[in-house]
Image: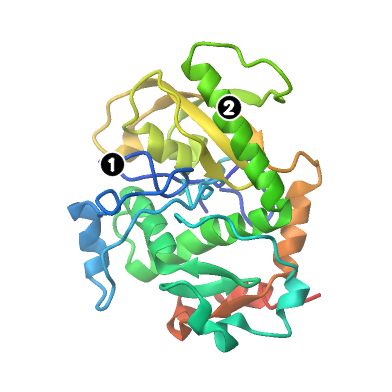
Amino acid sequence: MYPQGPFPSSALKKSLSRPPGQSRCGIGLAEPCTAAERAVPAEQAAIFRASPGVSELSFRAFSFRALSCGAWALALALAFGACAPAAPTDPASTTAASPARSSAAALPAGTVLTLNATPILVDEVDAIGSIVARVEVHHTLPSLRRIALTNVILPLVAARQVAGAEQHAAALARAHDWRGALARGETPVGPLTPPREDVLRGGVIELGLPIWAWALEAPLATWSEPIETVGAWRLVRVLERSAGYRPADVVLDVEVRTFVWDPAESFPQDLEDHLDRSKLEFVDESWRDVVPTLWQRRLRGSP
């Protein structure tokens, strides 16, 4: 399992961001990538070329879809598709008509799955998989996709649906306003609700993948753009970074500001309950071999 956000639960407890050399756009960040920024580093692209028919990956904002998604084990995180978040959908309303089967032509290009009618793109999954590959270099493409889906994509999409588009957008606006004040060296004032403040030390396990991946190469003492994790946007700045032979060996000291989407104490359980009622549909039938059987059974749209 991989760290993915501030709301650990019994089934998922995990987070994500960009690979080295990429700009601070894309997975887990609020700003979309340009075509040039979506290019995959050569060392990562080689992993995906091993599977016939798989195109080079693009790194697109999932904001959070980072991740946004606490960290509880080896991490995956950051940032989550360049697509704007879809409006929340009641799982019960999706069981009557299958968008994957009846409206596939209306789905975005590259859609491989839908969760309660929300499209999930292959690029979103593979961008996160390429980040996991920095930690676990021996994984196959199907394994990387499986980890990306169960630790990041599915929880993040579900969390957006539970919180709703309005709360998701409001938290992002607060994060942007707060970052602007911090960048000017000011203490934010006014009606803004103060975020949770933390100072974290460690690696991918302690920080979660969205924060870890961004912090590996970020300039010191510079605040990030909002990073999305499950249930919250994060602002992060690196206080100190050790040297390391591998990315997993680097020790990071970071300061974090957390802007939750839904402040209700019940949110973690609400997310679990929502997943239990959710319906996963296969636009690309070959992905049945990617999604673990346990998750296919869980995401059947049960009332």
State the image coordinates of residue 189 (x, y, percent, origin top left): 67, 15
Q: What residue do we see at 34% from left, 33% from top?
A: 216
- Is residue 151 rendered to the left or right of residue 52? right
Quarter of the rendering containing residue 243: top left
| Amino acid type, residue under disc 1 in the picture | Pro
Residue 139, percent from left and from top: 33, 62
Residue pointed to by mark 2: 177
**Residue 76 x, y percent position in the rendering:** 45, 49
10 Å neighbourhood of mark 1: few (<14), some, or many (≥20)?
A: some
- Numbered badge on residue 12: none
Q: Secondary structure at mark 2?
A: helix
Give me the residue at 77% from left, 52% from top: 269
The residue under the point 60% across, 12% down is 187
Q: Which residue is mark 1?
A: 20
Q: Is residue 199 visible?
A: no
Does the rendering let one see residue 56?
A: yes
The quadrant the C terminus occupies is bottom right
